Image (spheres, rainbow, N blue to C red):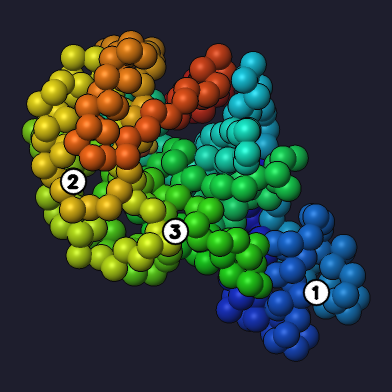
Amino acid sequence: MQIMNRENLFGKNIDELIEVAGKAGVPAFTARQIADWLYRKRVNSIEEMTNLPMKARKLLAEEYDFGLYPPENVSVSTDGTRKYLFRVLNDRYIETAFIPGKDHDTLCVSTQAGCKMGCVFCMTGKQGFQGNLTSGEILNQLKSLPEYETIHNIVYMGMGEPLDNLQEVLKSIEILTSPWGFGWSPTRITVSTIGIRDKLGDFLEKCRANLAISLHSPFEEERLRLIPAQKKNPLPDILDIIRKADINSQRRVSFEYILFRGVNDSPAHVKELARILNKIKCRINLIRFHAVPGIEYESPSHEEVVKFRDELNRKGFIATIRASRGEDIKAACGLLSTMQLNKSGNK
Ligand code: SF4
């Protein structure tokens, strides 16, 4: 569990580390050495930063924690998917999914405890909002895992709406992609959002990570029933921002589409999708809805999902079906943490 009463070094960017170095009485270039220990090396204590003068290490250790902390629990699926539970904000829980792949492993991280968006098909939405994660808490989900070295891609697709915590999300991406940080290419990072109108432009301007928009219906009224936050963030405005943004060939834009049987899986939906996504260079990821306790929507059959994909492909889109992973360990976003909150009486 994370100790909350001292500041953490992990999650600070280079400007903040320069300040830290100043307070410890060491030259500004030491900030890069500290960043190297934090983001490149496999250590988790200030004492292990052996190229720093002993006195500076002592001063740092008096003021700061390193800031890496392990998950509290892990569930392992028969397909190799692992779902980690981290304790944050003293008594709340977030989920992180490690998804092994044939060619590369992917990590799905949370950006908030709970969520304000209230999507009717999502257990995290049902928890309500409990708090924003810091950049350190976002990146701790990566660096503290035993699988850290094998993770190639990171998706901001776990609990929470990333653009509702934009500042910390951008800071975590800055640390991930900077040469003084993890040094990752932004092409390895995807941020998934319902599309927050006032923040999307900022996101596109300030970072080069891939963008995934949770669409789920091309019809505004219907999307509003699925995603209540659509009311303040109308779909035409979101699509307009994407069309006008300078999307270079390096950045991938995709639309996530959960298929609910008899709700959003008709030929009329294919036709309207083709109309509204016209001239946006994108791919469409289809996700088959899986039954969640207390949520009334039904799953379509695999054949129905394939048919929907083929119709989109015929319209000229690159549409793919995302493989379901970790169903036996309740990998749907928010299920495990809801169970943990119920268990600990913090619902
Ligand atoms: S689907 Fe995403 S945005 Fe919607 S409530 Fe769940 S976590 Fe929030």
Q: Label 2 near label 1: C-beta < 8 Å?
A: no
135 vs 315: above or below? below
Residue 8 location, x and y as percent?
Answer: 66, 61
Q: Which residue is mark 2?
A: 277
- Figure quadrant of residue 167: bottom left
Q: Dot 3: what SS?
A: loop
**Disc 3 and disc 2: Cα gap in Å?**
20 Å
Residue under the point 22% across and 27% down: 311
**Disc 1 and disc 2: Cα gap in Å?**
56 Å
Residue under the point 27% across and 33% down: 313
State which tag comes first along the sequence, 3 or 1.
Answer: 1
* Label drawn at residue 59: 1
Q: Amino acid at mark 2?
A: Leu
State which tag comes first along the sequence, 3 or 2.
Answer: 3
260 sits to left or right of 113: left
Question: Disc 3 or disc 1, which is closer to the eye?
Answer: 3
Mark 3 crowdedness (10 Å alpha carbons): few <14, some 14-19, many ≥20 = many
Q: Which residue is mark 3?
A: 209
Residue under the point 18% across and 14% down: 262
